Amino acid sequence: MDESLADLRQELLALLCRDAYRAGDFTLSSGQKSQYYINCKPVTLSARGAYLVGRLFLEQLAPEAVAVAGLTLGADPLVVAVSVLSNLAGQDRAALIVRKEAKGHGTMSFIEGPPLPQGAVVTVLEDVITTGGSALKAVGRLQEAGYVVNEVLGIVDRQGGGAAAFAAQGIPLRSLFQISDLEAYLNRT
C-alpha cells in the first residue's frame, strides 16, 4: 500500500469520469431532472474501483468509527471494500448494510451485519449525494438501532442540497469529489 493518496484519488477521478458519468437528460432518485447522471456501480463493483474507494474512504474514517454502513444497493460495495481493507490494515471495522424495507422473514431486520453494542459509532457511506435522502434513510435506521452516526462520507457530492440536509441533522458530510471536480476533469480531457 505504498501508493500516494493523491495518485489514488486522481486514478479514481479518471475512472469515475470514464465509467460513471453520463451526459443526457435524466431523472434522479430525488425526482430532480439533470443533464448528467453518475452511476458509480461500474466503478465500485470493479476490483480496482472498489480498492480505490475503499482506500480513500478508510483514510477518511474517524478513529472512533467501529463500522461503516450504507443503504443497499449503492453502498454495498463501499462498505465491504472499506471493511476488508480495514482488516488488512489491522483496524477491523465492521460493514453494515441498511435495507430499504425490513426483511420480510426471520429477524425482520433493517440492518444486516455483525452485532455492535448500543452507542457504537458508525460512519455512513454513499456513492452519489444529491439531496441526501438515501443516506438520511440509512442514518435514521442506524440511529433507531441505537448507533451513533458520526458523519457521512460520499464519493461524489452533486451539491444538490445534501450537505444542508445533513447539517440540519447535526451530521457532517465529506466527499471525495464535488461535481465540479468531475466537470473540470472532463473539460481537460
Image (cartoon, helix red, strand yellow):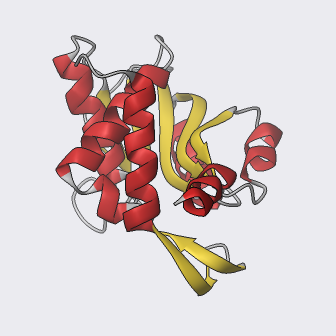
Image quadrant where one finds the N terminus: top left
Which residue appears farthest toward the front when viewing the image?
188
134, above or below 113, in the image: below
Q: Residue at the spot x=34%, y=25% of the render?
A: 116
- Residue 179: percent from left, percent from top: 65, 55
Q: Is residue 119 left or right of residue 170?
A: left
Q: Can residue 117 be seen in this snapshot?
A: yes
Q: Residue at the spot x=45%, y=27% of the render?
A: 6
Q: Residue at the spot x=29%, y=48% of the render?
A: 49
- Residue 185: percent from left, percent from top: 56, 54
- Residue 36: percent from left, percent from top: 61, 76
Q: Is residue 160 left or right of residue 12?
A: right
Q: Nearer the viewer, residue 19 or 174?
A: 19
Q: Nearer the viewer, residue 128 or 14?
A: 14
- Residue 31: percent from left, percent from top: 68, 80
89, above or below 113, in the image: above
Q: Can residue 102 be seen in this snapshot?
A: no
Q: Residue at the spot x=68%, y=79% of the render?
A: 34
Q: Is residue 144 left or right of residue 12?
A: right
121, above or below 109, in the image: above
Report the label total: 0
